[in-house]
Amino acid sequence: KRAKQPYMITRVHIRIYTIEELCYYICNNLYLIDYTLMNRQLCEWIREELHMWELADQLLGQMEKNCTAEQFVLTILEKSNVYSPGEINKVQNMLEKLQNQKDVERAKHKADSLLASKEYALAVLVYQSIVKNEWDDSVDKSFYGKVYGCLGTAYGQQFLYEEAAAAYKEAYRLSEDPEMLKAYMYCAYRSMPEAEYVKMLSGNSVYLSMDSLLKEELKQERSSVDMDV
């Protein structure tokens, strides 16, 4: 049955019209399962729009018993008859794996999901919350380097090159990954006045070497585009 009024998942601006669409969203966004799904509004929508009264009552009963978000979404998957028991078991295993992750790891996966969904502004907020909160000493600093790298990507996709450069620079400091340095150099090149960029390169052999490599790659890309045209 297709709902006349969709259920809106506000975080990612998605409208859900059928139980199949709801199940598909759950299975492809396990890192985003939170209050935007586990609430009375969804239960009432399932009742009123999809006429799945038994499922709605079961979900409301689980909420009254303070069930977990994982239990809540598994009930939806099991009662919808959209996925096979084997597929639901895989989802359950993934949810259990997520429960065993550290808070910062789960937060990064949430941000990564938003980034993959092109929700760049929301992804930035989650990445920023990770690096601005007190760091988890049990996590290697390279993890935070990856967070900064993803933050740079989220900024870059919005053409915010100055912010992206700052994030990539920190990513390189923490991880010493040449790809992070290359990304930093590119964003710095795009965001700085030419004189300031040249001054930054002056006397820094690492920067000068990467600048030469970057300009060669950009030259090859332009040549490839010209040939395609």
Image: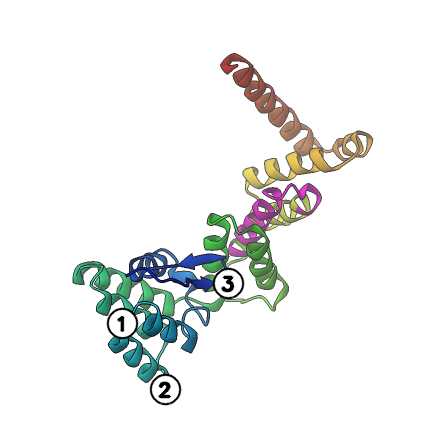
Q: Position of residue 197 (x, y in %)?
A: 76, 33
Q: CA distance from mark 1 to mark 2?
A: 19 Å
Determine which quarter of the picture holds residue 58. bottom left
1 or 2: mark nearer the eye: 1
- Which element carries disc 3, helix, strand or loop? loop
Amino acid type for the residue under numbered disc 3: Thr
Left/right of residue 100 with respect to residue 165 in the rendered view = left
On the image, numbered disc 1 is attached to which residue?
A: 52
| Along the viewing direction, whichever of 35 and 202 lies nearer the viewer | 35
| Residue most extreme to the front | 4
Range of residues picked out in magenta: 143-163
* Alpha carbon distance from label 3 to label 1: 23 Å
Is residue 48 rendered magenta in the image?
no
- Of badges 3 and 1, nearer the viewer stands 1
Numbered circle sitting on residue 10: 3
Question: What is the chief secondary structure element of the magenta stretch?
Answer: helix
